[in-house]
Image (spheres, coloured by chain):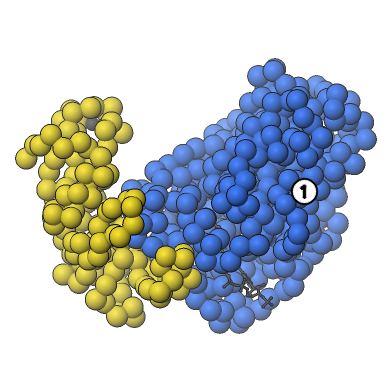
Amino acid sequence: MSTEAPFTIEQFYKFLAQGKLMAGKCMRCGKIHLPPRPLCDNCHGQEFAWMEISGKGTLVSFTVIHIAPQQFQASAPYAVGIMQLENGLKLPGMITGVPHEQLRIGMALTVDFGACTAAQPWPQWPRYCFKPA
Amino acid sequence: MVDGKPLVSIVSAGLSKFGKREGLYARELFAEAVKEAFDRCPRLEPKRDVKAMFVGHMGEAYEHQGHTGAAAADWAGLLNIPATRTEAACASSGAALLSGVYAVLSGLADVVLVGGVEKMTHRSTAEVTEYLAMASDYPFEQWHGITFPGLYALMATAHMHAYGTTEVQMAHVAVKNHYHGSLNPKAQMQKEITLEAALTSRVVASPLKLYDCSLITDGASCLILTKPELARRFTDQPVHIIGAGQASDSIGLYERQSLTSLQATKLAAQKAYQMAQVKPEDVDVAEVHDCFTIAEIIAYEDIGFCRAGEGGKLAESGETRLGGRLPVNTSGGLKAKGHPVGATGTAQAYEIYLQLTGQAERRQVKDARVGLTHNVGGSGATATVHIYRSET
Ligand SMILES: CC(C)(COP(=O)(O)OP(=O)(O)OC[C@H]1O[C@@H](n2cnc3c(N)ncnc32)[C@H](O)[C@@H]1OP(=O)(O)O)[C@@H](O)C(=O)NCCC(=O)NCCS
Ligand SMILES: [Zn+2]
């Protein structure tokens, strides 16, 4: 699947708001970039194609944050983790729907799209999160 | 015997008192460090001799003040020379030091002042947490509420899972560094702590607790560098930098191959060792980047003080405590001496300078001849490693 959309973080989040996890594939070396980039860090290729990737995967590490930055104070303590998707790429995010003491490396998770929307002027990115598969 | 060829020589060094320095502005703290460096080196005529400055400083948010190079030069009484701020998060002054090495080696400036500064404690912990997080990836890490302790907590969870590293082993790092801090009159915290206290302290980002974290600190540090052939003009006891390495890695922790090792540290260390013709076992004393206890454990492995996965055991063994085989963070480290982020890299070099010139008083490592410093920016997107040796 190829579109004219620019290979930017902004566009990644636009797709995300539509419920799609999209990566950029380098047409020269085949490397898949999540998030997409305008210049392949592997071969310096400049041609890409969008590809939709599965939001299923497993948890590779996690933590429960008690001391939070200002805008997250109300949510603390909250769990965040790094998820390894089925195609091997990794993505960090908040984990919801799992009691904190039940978090385990290796547990199956799935990306939950548009769990909340941003009210501020910039950036207007939706916040995805991870939930049990 | 190590006789790596000197790249540049340190002829003086200064460090402000670290801690809560109420009522001071960053440039005033910087002047405090500079004063000490000038006082230690009466043969230096600063206005005549110093030809360039590099100053590490991480964040303008703390004091609503950027443009730190010029401000620091101004308050150091060194206006007119080129003075540039270097920024690489918590490795800002490690980067200043390497910039100074480049400047001296280029031949364009034969005496260079390098240093760093940060003023943090007048801000609330929530504000500091937010400003520090700016050194991590915004769109995918900060945006999702991940803090600095959070990033190192992710590494800790992964390291524990991969190698069986324990919270007790991490607590040993805290106990050791607090002990060392208790011997350092400039440390922010000069009290010893027990293993029990460390293990029962409140959670910051699980599994990291209060005593696994470095401190929020005000402080400044600086060094005076020159060409090896000029060093004797300024001091009878120069310390030589014989190896220097810096490397970068992905800004996002999530993009890295490994969560249990910092590739930038490994690359920077390899480069520095090779340049210095030194092996890890030649190092007598080291200051490593213990922004969190797990970071010191991972540093042991990446710098080659032990094999991958054995950092926890090394922490527990006591070998890295004063009196052990390889004392690490004799200053108290970021844990107890404190971590004014922009000042940390050259503050580590200050400790090694004291150690290799026999001026470390109660924390002196006997016969220390070869030293190493390791400074990390962010979750490992920057790392610098420097290797030092004494004149004799
Ligand atoms: C750990 C941390 C969140 C604690 O902040 P806090 O909860 O606001 O704690 P306070 O400042 O209220 O201090 C409460 C007490 O704990 C002590 N304390 C604070 N931080 C401490 C630490 N890291 N280790 C040991 N003791 C600490 C204080 O001295 C104080 O003691 P007192 O009551 O005897 O005076 C904060 O120090 C921190 O964010 N550290 C990490 C900094 C960091 O990430 N640096 C960059 C690394 S890359
Ligand atoms: Zn490519």
Please, what secondary structure does the residue beneath circle 1 have? helix
Q: Is residue B92 above or below residue B294?
A: above
Q: Which of the pair B309/B106 is nearer the observer?
A: B106
Q: Residue at x 27, y 28 (%)?
A: A43
Left or right of B293 in this view: B142: left
For disc 1, the neighbor class at 10 Å (few under 14, some 14 to 19, many from 20) is many
Measured as percent of width and height from the top left, residue B172 is found at: 60, 70
Image side of residue A111 versus residue B78, left or right: left
Q: Which chain is blue?
A: B
Chain letter for the yellow colouring in the rendering: A
Circle 1 residue: B28
To which quarter of the image does residue B183 belong? bottom right
Left or right placement of residue A9 versus residue B172 in this view: left
Whether residue B99 is visible, yes or no, is: yes
Write down the quadrant of residue B340 in the picture.
bottom right
Chain of the residue displaying label 1: B
Q: Considering only vertical position in the picture, is A115 above or below A87?
A: below
Percent coordinates x, y for residue A99 in the rendering: 29, 80
Give the vertical position of B212 relative to A40 (above or below). Answer: below
Residue B196 in picture, x, y percent from top left: 61, 82
Mark yes or no: residue B375 visible. Answer: no
- Placement of the N terminus of chain B among the 4 image quadrants: top right
Vertical order, B272 against A113 (above or below):
above
- The disc labelled 1 sits on which kind of residue? Glu
Image coordinates for residue A64, horizontal then vertical, percent: 39, 72
Tell me which residue sits at (39%, 43%) in the image: B250
